[in-house]
Image: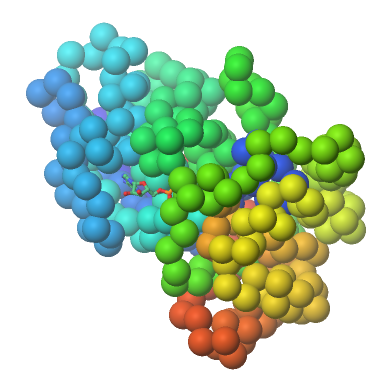
Amino acid sequence: MNEIRVFCPATIANISCGFDVLGLALDAVGDEMVVRKSREKGIVITKLEGQDLPMETHKNVAGVAGMALLEQTDYTGGFEIEIYKKIKAGSGIGSSAASSAGAVWAMNELLGKPFDALQLVAFAMEGERLASGVAHADNVAPALYGGFTLVRSYEPLDIVPIPAPSKLYATVIHPQIEVRTADSRKILKTNITLQDGIRQWGNVGGLVAALFTDDYALLGRSLEDHIVEPIRSILIPGFADIKSGALKAGALGSGISGSGPSIFALSKGLEIAQNVGEQMKKTYRDIGVDYDVHVSKINHEGIKLLD
Ligand code: ADP
């Protein structure tokens, strides 16, 4: 096997209470990549369609993540990568993570799987470091494992895969405005009160328990964030209206996807998730904001081979 084509899913990081530790993989939206072995050492990005992004190896997250993997092998050849972006960069649904994780997953397949999923997360995090200045794992982990993931610890890296209830659907709306990940990090406080901490870890525990026990009501109650959302939502037009509209349309909960500006909602069943999408669209139409909407079941397998 010298060449493969892979689907690299979009992901929702944070999921309200789980800042930098929780994430989930989507099914209805993602990039495609073709990765092939080449004789020459190193990585060359030979094609990049769909988004205006740098193709130089050291400026593209796929190149940087791929080089991190390559440095740990004794494989003497290299790889060519074609990237077909469907996820808009800076949307808050893991555009950079899809490329970082997709590159290392595909390279690992072509090399006969010398690395496990946890090692692939560590390589892909180097791509995230390039994209946002912070080597976070909350998008690359669900892209690689599928379902929901918890980053229990960064040092040492410890990823906990979490199952998703079968009727759980995500709705994501992406307002067409730019929020730079670095900016949306800069405005955050670096200290929290004990009272906020107690509420937050109570919700993280509740959310994880709900996912393991298919308890949709508990899941809804746990989708709360008293620390990051009140600050970051200031950068997102119409956030409060989108969120309250989603809840009125039947969503279990709603919050900021990753560092924004996308807003997500989780719902029980496809029909409610679609209604939530319609309500979100109406809200943005009323205030004159352009948008993309995605309604998706949870992707249980993560990155996968195509044809
Ligand atoms: P998202 O919020 O959707 O995860 P990020 O803001 O994390 O997106 O990442 C986008 C940043 O990463 C942009 O600055 C972009 O130029 C850079 N980047 C480099 N290579 C890629 C790539 N292959 N795909 C997406 N973004 C990339």
Q: Report whether 6 appears left or right of 169.
A: left
Q: Give the quarter of the figure containing the N terminus.
A: top left
When asked about the image quadrant of residue 269, the answer is: bottom right
Q: Nearer the viewer, residue 89 or 232?
A: 232
> Residue, x 66% and y 36% (percent of image)?
190
Q: Is residue 116 visible?
A: yes
- Residue plotted at (48% across, 50% down): 183
In-front residue for pair 168/225: 225
Q: Is residue 294 above or below residue 20?
A: below
Dividing the picture into quadrants, the one containing residue 126 is: top left
Residue 119 in picture, x, y percent from top left: 48, 20
Residue at (72, 63) in percent of width and height:
254
Q: Position of residue 209 (x, y in %)?
A: 85, 40
Q: Is residue 267 left or right of residue 128?
A: right
Q: What is the basis of the colouring in this image?
A: rainbow
- Any part of residue 306 in sight: no
Task: Indicate the position of residue 287 as horizontal and vertical percent values.
Answer: 57, 86
Looking at the image, the residue that sits furthest to the left is: 40
Q: Residue at x 57, y 82 (%)?
A: 284
Compared with 185, 77 (above or below) is above
**Quadrant in the picture for residue 296:** bottom right
Q: Is residue 116 above or below residue 231?
A: above
136 over 228 or under it: above or below: above
Residue farthest toward the bottom in the current orientation of the protein: 286
